[in-house]
Image (tube, grey):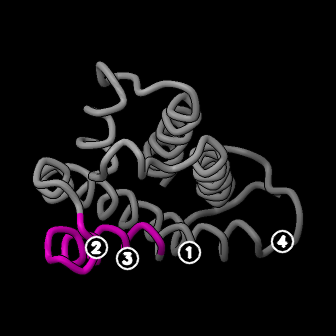
Amino acid sequence: MRATAGVVAGTLAALGGLHAVWARSPWPCRDREQFADLVVGVTPDRLPSPQACLGVAGMLGAGAYLVAARGGLLPAVGPRRLPAVGSAGVAAVLLARGSVGPLLFGTGRVPRTPRFVRLDRRVYAPLCAALGAGAALVAANGRQVD
């Protein structure tokens, strides 16, 4: 279970770092136009604000901590049940994003660019589903350190 917790928490932390970078830069895309198309699926004028990127980065970091704490990789702080309940919440959000995203994007309900829709179906949604499944395993079977 520690290995699963490490992979999920490490990936969430890395994605949080990437979202923090996106508050200031379109890296690894060459410019804002390519970033808007591939990563967000909108026109550049509709890109999220830097504050929104940092908010997502913070949530991903918190999710990484909760999964790591539930998996026994980090000491738990706060209420005793927080890592168990929190990692289950992380799992629920990621599983929802992995399953609902492809149903919304590209159908007209939530308009996105064709390149984003293709990437979402091939990369983003499956990654969310896999991370959600891993977080669910950790939430159900983890042994946090007190």
Please provide percent x and percent y for residue 106.
15, 69
What amino acid type should be assigned to the residue bearing mark 4?
Answer: Arg
Q: Amino acid at mark 3?
A: Ala
Q: Which mark is residue 88?
A: 1
Q: Quick one: label 4 or label 2, which is nearer the N terminus?
A: 4
Label 3 residue SS: helix
Could you tell me the amino acid type at mark 1? Answer: Ala
- Write down the quadrant of residue 142 in the picture: bottom right
Q: What secondary structure is marked by label 2?
A: loop
State how far apart marks 2 and 1 are (Cα): 27 Å
- Structural distance between the alpha carbons of marks 2 and 3: 16 Å
Q: Which residue was labeled with disc 3?
A: 96
Q: Quadrant of the C terminus?
A: bottom right
Quote the CA–CA distance across marks 1 and 3. Answer: 12 Å
What residue is at 36 percent from the left and 69 percent from the top? 97
**N-terminal of the two: label 3 or label 4?**
4
Residue type beneath disc 2: Val
For the point 47% across and 76% down, the residue is: 92
